[in-house]
Image: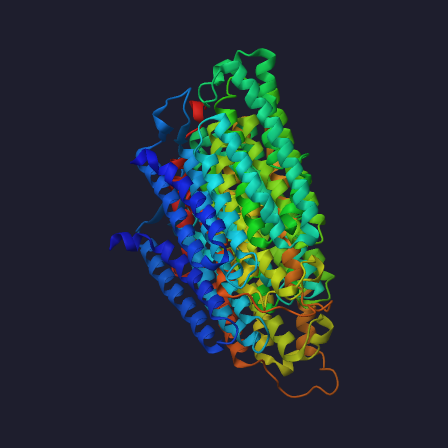
Amino acid sequence: MTEFLPVIAVFVPFLAGVLQFLFGPRVVPWWPVLAVAATVASSLWVVAAVAQGGEISHALGGWDAPLGIEVRVDGLAAIMLLLTAVVGALVSLYAFAIYNRSHDNASHYWALWLLLWGSLNVLFVSGDLFNLYVALELVSLAAIPMVLLAGPGKTVGAALRYLHFALFGSLVYLAGVAITYGLAGSLDLRLVADALADGGLAGALAAACLVTGVLIKAAIVPFHIWLPAAHGNAPAVVSAVLSALVVKACLYLLLRLWTEPLAGITGAYAAQLLGAIGATAILYGSLQACRQERLKLVVAYSTVAQLGYMLLFFPMASALAWEGAVYHGVAHGVAKAALFLAAGNVLAYVGHDRVRELRGLDRPLSVSLFAFALAGVSIMGLPPSGGFMAKWLLLSAALESGQWWWVAVLMVGGLLAAVYIFRVLRFAFLQAPGPAIAEPGPAPGALRTWPAMILALLAIALGFTTAPLLGLLGGLPGGGA
Amino acid sequence: MTGLYQAMPLWVLFVSAVTAVVVFATGEQWQRLRTTLNLSGAVIKLVLVGVMLWGVDQGHTFVVRVPLLAELDLVLHADALSMLFATLSAILWLVTTIYAIGYLEDSPDRARFFGFFSLCVTATMGIAMAGNLFTFFIFYELLTLATWPLVVHRGTDKAMAAGRTYLQYTLIGSAVFLVGIVALYLLDGPSDFVAGGELQHLGDAHPAALTVIFLLLMAGIAVKAAMVPLHGWLPAAMVAPAPVSALLHAVAVVKAGAFGIVRVVYDVYGVALTQELALGVGLAIAASFTIIYGSLRAIWQTDLKRRLAFSTVSQVSYIALGVGLGNPLATVGGLAHLVHQGLMKITLFFCAGNYAETHHIHSIHELDGIGRRMPWTTAMFTFGAFGMIGVPPLAGFVSKWYLGLGAVDAEYYWVIPVLIGSTVLNAIYFLPLLHRAWFRPPPDGATGQHEAIPSLLLPTLFVGFASVGAGLFAAFSWSPLGWVDLIVEREYLP
């Protein structure tokens, strides 16, 4: 039974999404409620099974590798399934307040979101390169139309740009898959490593294509230019998922590729290069976030920056760095979803999100603003929070490996994050006279404020749950020290 | 049952954390409920701390340990040093809560204020009871974050600018502090605070690394302890409401820094290692410089609270001085000053708050004749000022006496002129205020006695007399000095 659990966790959201699409608006909201509950339950079931019994792997249809399709859930995949289930559940709660029966696009939203959720789960449970390609495509194809849900006006350009980058990234990745298949005659993650390592130039090319393709989709500097517009203009529920989960899923793939099929071919230079790209992302993204005039763009550029921290794993490649990078992914996912949902509440109440004009908001929007601040604590990497524990691990890894330059990057990145988070809070606390809020909307209800608050509290709670979560994750694949 | 009793440090934190959450949740309109919650939280905490104080005196151990990483635990414990800081904070929290309720009557955003106020006290208690550097850092940062909303509470441009300065200093300082902690953990593995120093076993190994790490740690902590040149945030933060200046900036935040110095020197490095690496004397020199510089700057401040702030800069470094001299007598002086300075400075700030709230007095020029109009407040102000100057037998004198004895004992004779110079400078910036208050005539039109309202005056009287008592009864074993003797005994004779 256990080996079918991952398949269930994939099919439940997929099937629910397709049916939602067929049934249309009349089944909203009860069908999405059921679908979300079932998806969360099936995902958590997989996670619980992995936590108890270790890795699950299953060859679909009974065909073993290299012929069949392998479904595999290890500690890393379980962590990602858990993150997706928790963030997905809370974002869905928030979405019930918006995409209910009275909303024209409700059916589209729920169908796309369930398909996206299913695609993410496919990505996490896949054990071969081609399946991962298909999953990556599905994720993009479900995510991009969701950007358009904000209304066609300003989002068409953003969505198109996102589409172009996603397609380009897919092509590059697919080229890497093709070369790998030519070299290895297999696409199973664990079987191609030797062939790639022995493949000489072709192997290196394949590796470069795979990595570059994923970097484009993950919006890593300099391929980030599609992200701020897409994440900044999409509806808050969509931005939260895109920033917390979708780009994170691409980086999950990069970690997966690096530690398994590419383990034999990646050299120190490539690793330092990826680290340098990560450092650039951290510094550039943070500086841009400090300069943005719109709240959601601040949060979007913060994503550009925060993704960079996960790339710092590659140059250090130690057990500490592995734990730090993955924990950072989890902490950022939870905190960023909270930030976007809170920003969505500000936008809905004020009618705009120009940072300078958000004055005296702590009275009408105290819960949302508190959520923003708490999530900000994790983003800044200050204790007690998940972001702090990740930073502690990454700092330890950097000092342990003697690569002190990453210490400087981590410190400066944290301080710049403090600048852009406190800049927002500063305006929100300011009582000085300024342009008043013209026509405040209705104060957001509990269904919109509390998901953000719960996510923010989870980001803080992650500061105390390192032991069980890192136990679930397990050590660095390949047992590197 | 013993488990629950052993976990007392956790319950103490719980009380103020829960108070904070409930106060946030009750919202602005439930004033009476909020007051009840605040006061009962403070009283319950005081009782718990009292029980723990008794327990530590009896030699009971209080430890709570939560594993976070393979070798990293969150540790809360209570030793004699913890209780010195925890008791001071618990008593002053109750007093300041009463004062703050009176001070902020009818002003907006009180739920937010008292919520963060309780959160600050949670952080202070956590700092007092942290059992290792990692845990210390967590609460140290929590204190930074929870204080910011109080500094910017008024929401004016000036408050925002002060808040920004505060964050610049503290966040950069803590980034440096964090690197120091991580480096120390990689060098020696994580270990708890140990009386006599956890690094003692390293002996002569790694002198360079240990020196660099010490400097990183001190740079981080010295920001909160407001040691020159890292003191710039403190005078700016005086824009906050008086109870914040009183409790947080005179006691909690700067004391967190001073307390951190004590912990690092005594329980991480150990006195012997600190002296061997010549780090102690470096600390003593930095502290002496701060003592003189802060006093000199105080002379030229015309804003009352700013003058007091520079006085704090100067006085807090007595603690670092006592620690740096690395001698039992000097340690007694330094640690006793942790409490003495707290009591005296909170008295002075309460008085400044009374002047501001009752007669809108902010500048020292407006103090003329205030002694006739507010005799009780001014009497307490006088006690505080005399204590700071070090007039015998007040508390400040007791601290300085032990510091001087310790300096002579350790043969650091240059400390004596520093102490004398500081006393003279203290007199120069305090006596003119007292002269104005008692001997100048009030400005025209202002006659008759007009004291502060009882909820401001009573806490002021309490801390004023407590500061006098700490000096008068210093010879008793239950005085702050008596407790400090116990700590020093345990530190130097492990």
Is residue B349 visible to us here?
yes
Residue A153 locus on image (x, y percent) = 70, 54
Residue visible at 36% across and 62% down in the picture: B48
- Residue A255, compared with residue B263, is above or below; it is above
Q: Quadrant of the N terminus of chain B?
A: bottom left
- In the displayed structure image, the side of residue B160 where residue A377 appears, left or right: left
Q: Quadrant of the C terminus of chain B?
A: top left
- Residue B298, compared with residue A197, is above or below; it is below
- In the displayed structure image, the side of residue B66 where residue A441 appears, left or right: right
Residue A73 locus on image (x, y percent) = 40, 33
Q: Seen from this angle, which residue lies furthest front?
A: A22
Is residue B220 visible to us here?
no
Residue B151 locus on image (x, y percent) = 62, 62
Residue visible at 48% across and 29% down in the picture: A131
Residue visible at 65% across and 36% down in the picture: A165
Q: Nearer the viewer, residue B467 or A79?
A: A79
- In the displayed structure image, the side of residue A11 where residue B252 appears, left or right: right
Q: Seen from this angle, which residue lies furthest left?
A: B1
Q: Nearer the viewer, residue B222 or A429?
A: A429
Q: Quadrant of residue A206?
A: top right
- Residue A258, compared with residue B120, is above or below; it is above
Residue B152 locus on image (x, y percent) = 63, 62
Total numbered circles: 0
